[in-house]
Amino acid sequence: MRVIFFLICFTVIGAYGLKSQDREIIEVDLTLDEVIHLAHQQSLFSFRARNMYLSRYWEFRSYRADRLPSLVLNSTPVNFDRSVVERWDPQQEQDRFVSLSSFSSNAALSVRQNVTFTGGVFDVTSSLSRREDIDRGMVEYASVPVSVGFTQSLNGYNRFRWESRIEPLKFEQAKLDYLQSIEQLSVQATNHFFNVATAEINQRIARVNYANADTLYRIGRGRFEIGTVTQDELLDLELGLLNAELAVSRAEIDVKQAHASLNSFLALDDDIRVRCIVPDRIPDLQVDADLALNLALENNPDILSYQRQVLEAEQNVARTRSETGLNANIRANLGINKNAGDIDLAYRSPFLEQQQFRVGVSMPIVDWGVHRGRVQMARSNQEVTEATVMQALQDFEQDAIISVLDFNLQKNQVAIAARADTIAQMGYDVTMQRFMIGKVDVIRLNSARNSLDAARRAYIDALRRYWVSYYGLRRMTLFDFIENRALIDELDELLQR
């Protein structure tokens, strides 16, 4: 939905504006949904969240690529060596220092495949080497047309197997983290929206109060002249007028700050002024606590984070144990090779059989308990992690239930605030009429006006709490309760924006 972008474009072309210095202020009416949608499209926070997800996406792609066969070329094209070395002289039957000059080059092409099940590496290699004895003018080639090898560690730690359990979990968490950041963006957009709405309402209240205070002061001054209003009452009216004038000045500054903050958040130009259309209706929605808790346990990235922390703690124990005991590895290789003075002959049968089998062993004899201490430390960290995760999971479930209960109360709070606003308006109108005919004093009128102002602000605050609570619930469960669908279904659409 790119209606907001086009709306702004058309508004810039054809809408009315107010001139401010040399720039024209363009006023645009936006609802809460439109402000949230615009924040999702072009805000800096949305851009940052999307790129953080893409970074994790390419990290996962690298993990997947590491599981595919790789083609590697290793080559030393130029290796010139001129040096004095000690060599055995058969004629004199003793070692002698001789000067040798040689030029060599080699290249090897290998296909390697990581074996997830065992943690080893399987490779197929073909290589060719050339060596020239410059002093004697001799050239020799050595070829390995094909060689099949396998390398395996025997220390019990399989990195590939642990990664196959952790990396997909990290990527799924990255998806949910991105969706959660978008919902957090909705919460921020809602707060910015109602900051502007509240500031504009306070400004309207301040202007109306100033106009009323001015009118009342004029009336009071006239009545003072005929003796129906005392001097202290007139001074109260004048003080109310001055306070109303100060309130107008403060309200105008607050409106400018709120608009500047909203424009910065939405990445809008300074010459665009957003007029927030406050929603006058809220959806008839009651969320089942058990349903919301199950959705949160299923969709919230914190749950995957808890699982990943436990797995990484177990991985750390396995890795530490493998590094502190007997370390052994094997290398087996089977192939064919041949050496000849001509490159064609180096690849002509018969070939010699190439075989290699190597076992490497490393075992600490005396380490004064260092390795055992590391294993115990890793196990202690694992136990701490498991206990922390268990406590965090319990707190998460409690917070989820409290959030649902709080949201379900907000609808009633909005209804009460709306009714209170209506009653306060009716009460103020009646009090104003009675004051005009001299039936009510200034104190009662000021009290009615203050009640009206407080009721209007309370209504806006109730709307803010409702929508902040709703988007907070969406952030926790990653579920749209109004449309009754999981937010993961919108992932591709969000990334294409």
Image (spheres, helix red, strand yellow):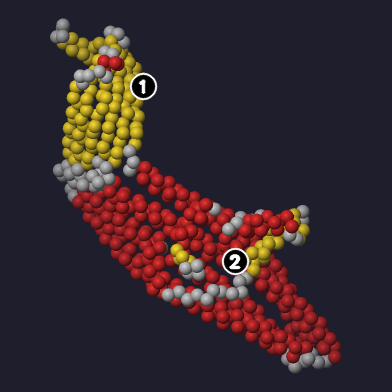
Horizontal and vertical percent position of residue 14? 74, 57
Q: Where's residue 160, x and y in %?
A: 29, 46
Tell me where residue 386 sits by quadrant.
Answer: bottom left
Q: Quadrant of residue 281?
A: bottom right
> Taking the image as drawn, is residue 270 in sight?
no
* Relative to 136, 264 lies left or right: right
Q: Amino acid at mark 1?
A: Pro
Tell me if mark 1 has few (under 14), some (14-19) or many (20+) residues whose alpha carbon lies within 10 angstroms of its own. Answer: few
- Residue occupying image coordinates x 34% and y 32%: 72
Does residue 59 appear in this view? yes
Q: Mark 2 — residue?
A: 32
Residue 215's x, y, as percent?
79, 81
The answer to whether residue 3 is left or right of residue 106 is right
Work out which quarter of the rendered image holds the N terminus and state it.
bottom right
Q: Which mark is residue 77?
A: 1
Crowdedness of circle 2 by 10 Å Cα count: few (<14), some, many (20+)?
some
User: Which mark, by number, is residue 446?
Assistant: none
Question: Could you tell me the amino acid type at mark 2?
Answer: Leu
Relative vertical location of residue 471 with respect to residue 326 in this rendering, above or below: below
Labels 1 & 2 near each other (Cβ < 8 A): no
Camera-nearest residue between 1 and 181: 1
Element class at badge 1: strand
Q: Secondary structure at mark 2?
A: helix
Residue 251 drawn at (x, y percent): 68, 70
Q: Is residue 272 above or below residue 89?
A: below
